[in-house]
Image (cartoon, helix red, strand yellow):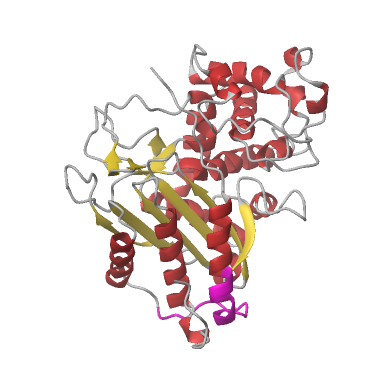
Amino acid sequence: MPTCLRGHRPSSGSFLLLIAIVAGIAARASTAEPPSDDELDPTELLEIAEEVRKRFDQPAVAVAYVRGDRDPVAAITGVRSVQAGRAATINDRFHFGSCTKAMTATLIGMLVHEKKLDWEDPVLGFFPEFAGSALEVYREVTVRDLLSHRAGLVAATDGKSPEAQSIHGLTGTPRQQRRQAVEIFLSMEPPVSPRRESRYSNAGSAIAAAIAEELTDRSWEDLLRAYVFEPVGMERAGFGWPATTDNPEQPLGHLDLPKGLHPLPVDTTYHLNDVIAPASNVHGTVTDLARFARSHLLALRGQPASIPSDVARKLHTPADENQPEALGWVRLPIAGQPASWHNGSTGTFFAWMTIWPDLNLAVVVLTNAGSGEPACAAITERIVKRLTESTADEDSPPLE
C-alpha cells in the first residue's frame, strides 16, 4: 500500500501568524494576571468558530479552551465531509498531525521520571549493534537532542525524500520497522551539525519511540495509551485517520486543491508510514486534545497532574536558549506571556494547541482540511482577546 511521510513543520507562515498574535494582543495582556473571570460559554465559543469557519472556508472546526483543573469548554461546527454534508459532532475525531510529537515527548519524560533512562543518555547506547553503521557525528547525540530537533537528523517529512524512500517497504510490526529505521537514519548524512543547529525532523520522534520500545519491550502505541491517553483522560484517542472502512462515521480529511476542497475517502491509499507515527499519527476529539493540554498546564503551574511538574518544566524548556524548540513543544511569547505551542498537519487536517501557564489558559483548535492554519490562528486570537478583554487596550489595532 502506498504511503506518504508528509509531516507538518512549524513553517515560516505559522511563525508569522504567531508573531501577529504577539503584536496584536501583547498590549492587551501586558501583566501576568490571569484573564477575566467572565468566561466564554459554549454558545459564544460556537459563534466564534462558525464565523471563522465560514471566513476561511473550512468543512468543520472544533475548538476548546481550558482553565486549570476545570473541564474543557468545547464547541464544534461544520460538516464531516463537503460531499456528504453530515454535521460534525463534539465527539468526532480529528487527526492531530505533529501535535503527536508533544505526546511522544511526554511519554519519554515519564520514562525518565521512572528512571528508565536519562535525557542526556547517548542514543547509540540503546542500539550498540548499530555502532558500526552509524556515522561518527551521531555518537554524542542524546535523547534530549532527538526531541528538540537538535540531533541533525534528516527531516523525514516529505514522502519523496531519500529518507522516505529508504524506509518505504520495511517489513514486520510497526515496532520492528522503527527499529530498522534507527539504523537507516543514523547512517544518513546530517543536513545540519548535530547538537549545534536545529532542524525540524520526524526522525527524532521515531528514534525516541524506538528507544522507549527497546527499554520496555512494549510498542509505542501501547506505551502511549498507558502513559498518556489513559492518565490524561483522552478517551477517544487512537492512531491513524479518524474515518476508516470499519468506522466511516467520522470526519474526513480534505486536501486543498485548485478546484476546491477534496475529501479523502475512507479507503484512501494515503497513509502515514508506521516509522514516523510517533511524530504525527494520533487522532482524537477536541476534548481529548484539550485534556492533554490541560495536563501540561496544571503541571507547569505546579498543580496536581498526570505529569510531574519537573518533567513538564524539562519538556517546556528550550534546549538552546537562542532557539524556540523545546522537547515536543515550541516556546514563544504569545499574548505578552510565555507560551508553549505546536501545530500539526498531514495536508488533510490541521491541529493547533497553545498553553499559557501564567494566564492559566490552554486553547486547542482543529479543522478537517489541510488549509486550516489561518482559521486555527484566528480562533486562538479571538479567544485570547475575549478572555483578556478586561485588561484590553481599546486602541490596539485588530489582527485581521
The residues colored magenta run 22-38
Give the farthest residue toward the bottom.
Answer: 394
In the rendered structure, the answer to whether residue 199 lies left or right of residue 283 reads: right
Q: Position of residue 296 (x, y in %)?
A: 56, 55
Residue 202's quadrant in the figure?
A: top right
- In the displayed structure, 210 sits above or below 43; it is above
Residue 313's quadrant in the figure?
A: bottom right
Q: Position of residue 356 (x, y in %)?
A: 57, 65
| Residue displayed at 68% across by 36% down | 146
In the rendered structure, the answer to whether residue 54 lies left or right of residue 383 reads: left
| Residue displayed at 38% across by 17% down | 1
| Residue displayed at 81% across by 41% down | 196
Query: Does the segment drawn in magenta span residue 33?
Result: yes
In the rendered structure, the answer to whether residue 322 lies left or right of residue 390 reads: right
In the rendered structure, the answer to whether residue 199 lies left or right of residue 65 reads: right
Residue 305 in view of the camera: no
Residue 174 in view of the camera: yes
Instruction: Work out which quarter of the rendered image holds the C terminus and state it.
Output: bottom left
Give the farthest residue toward the front.
Answer: 258
Q: Position of residue 299 (x, y in %)?
A: 59, 57
Q: How many marks?
A: 0
Q: Position of residue 158 (x, y in %)?
A: 53, 31
- In the displayed structure, 31 sits above or below 289; it is below
Query: Does the segment drawn in magenta span residue 359?
Result: no
| Residue displayed at 64% across by 57% down | 331
- In the displayed structure, 95 sits above or below 215; it is below
